[in-house]
Image: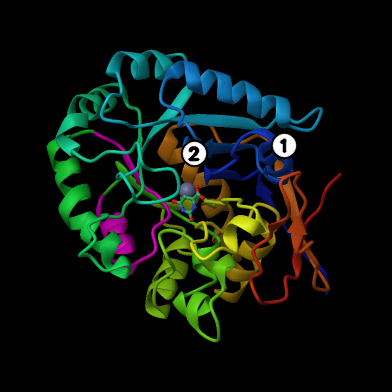
Amino acid sequence: MTKTITLRTPDDWHLHLRDGDMLRAVAPETARHFARAIIMPNLVPPVVTGRDAAAYRDRILNALPAGSTFDPLMTLYLTEDTDPDDLEAAHKDGLVTAVKLYPAGATTNSASGVRDFDKVRPVLERMAEIGCPLCVHGEVTDSDIDIFDREAVFIERVLDPIRRGTPGLRVVMEHITTMQGVEYASESGPDLGATITTHHLVINRNHILAGGIKPHYYCLPVAKREEHRLALRKAATSGDPSFFLGTDSAPHTDANKLLPCGCAGCFTATNTLSILAEVFEQEDALHHLEAFTSLNGPKFYRLPVNDGQITLTKGDPVAYPPQIETTDGPVTVFDPQMPLHWWVETD
Ligand code: DOR
Ligand code: ZN
């Protein structure tokens, strides 16, 4: 029996598009199904000023297929030298939607991130004043903290103190991976949102480490134990407005993934909506899929929901290409290790 569901056109509230040839290869994969995305600023060098964001936005628009109406929502990479006036001007112009906080050393291209949180206090205070959300990579980087505990420790030692010290600051906990993240987000009220990736709804740490090491499942924050994955699935499929989709689709060429020190990131732009429909159906929650992909995010960001709609149809399993080609080499598409029965109808 064929079934269909129609959703307001989705948005991706956390996306890596990179630059140059990689950008040209991956931008159409997201623009095919999503109307908007929050674009991560961790280029080399990072997007730190309003001027950088304007130039990057132009490069993204130039990389889109002809006729695409995809709207990249730009972010600035918070550094200890970020100028609050530059940020305020870019936010007021509508050029910059949010600011991204990477603790220095937490992940790919985060070397220019924040070491001393007191140094960014004036920027955070300005953001609270002008209503500009802070997107947070929520992991401490201390070498004595086990990598599987870095998110929970960040909430206690960094996030909660920042929020208490900056009343009115609106924060998105990006790509939460733990039950502690779920609990903190669900208890914290409307000034705190949390994105959840597609892949963290599907994999736990066994996918990376059991039966041989699987670099294509390695991302940051690293996937945790099964009990955490189950907490994430419950949160994502609950309809709770605190939780919305941020795929963290993060392309790296296979050559850069399959190294003795390989890059972190799962590339999910191509098959994300098929995977999400499958997950929500497994949880008996297809009626909450639209809230997660299309309603809760705009509500948090105080933006209108999209006008358009997409239709997903259920039938025989669909096949996605295992890789997409780029001039730098192939990028492997995330393999959810389950048949996908839903696909997006295109006109
Ligand atoms: O897995 C990840 N990849 N996590 C991040 O935080 C960064 C991203 C990337 O840029 O590749
Ligand atoms: Zn990311």
> Which part of the image, by quadrant, shows the N terminus?
bottom right
In the rendering, at what x and y percent does residue 259 appear?
56, 63
Q: Distance between the Cα atoms at labels 1 and 2?
A: 16 Å
In the rendering, at what x and y percent does residue 336 appear?
64, 71
Q: Is residue 6 left or right of residue 161?
A: right
Q: Residue at label 1? A: 24
Colour scheme of the picture: rainbow
At x 34%, y 32%, the residue is: 78
The quarter of the picture where residue 151 lies is: bottom left
Residue nearest the observer in this picture, 208 or 5: 208
- For badge 2, the amino acid type reads Met
Q: Residue at label 2? A: 40
The quarter of the picture where residue 54 lies is: top right
Label 2: element kind: loop
- For badge 1, the amino acid type reads Arg
Specify whether tag 2 is near ligand 2 (CB below 8 Å).
yes
> Is 28 inside the magenta-drawn segment?
no
> Is 175 inside the magenta-drawn segment?
yes
At x 24%, y 22%, the residue is: 126
Q: Are marks 1 and 2 in contact (CB under 8 Å)?
A: no
Q: Does residue 261 appear in the picture of this structure?
A: yes
Taking the view exactly as shown, the residue that stands out farthest to the front is 260
Q: In this rendering, is residue 111 above or below 47?
A: below
> Which part of the image, by quadrant, shows the C terminus?
top right
Q: Which residues are magenta?
A: 169-188
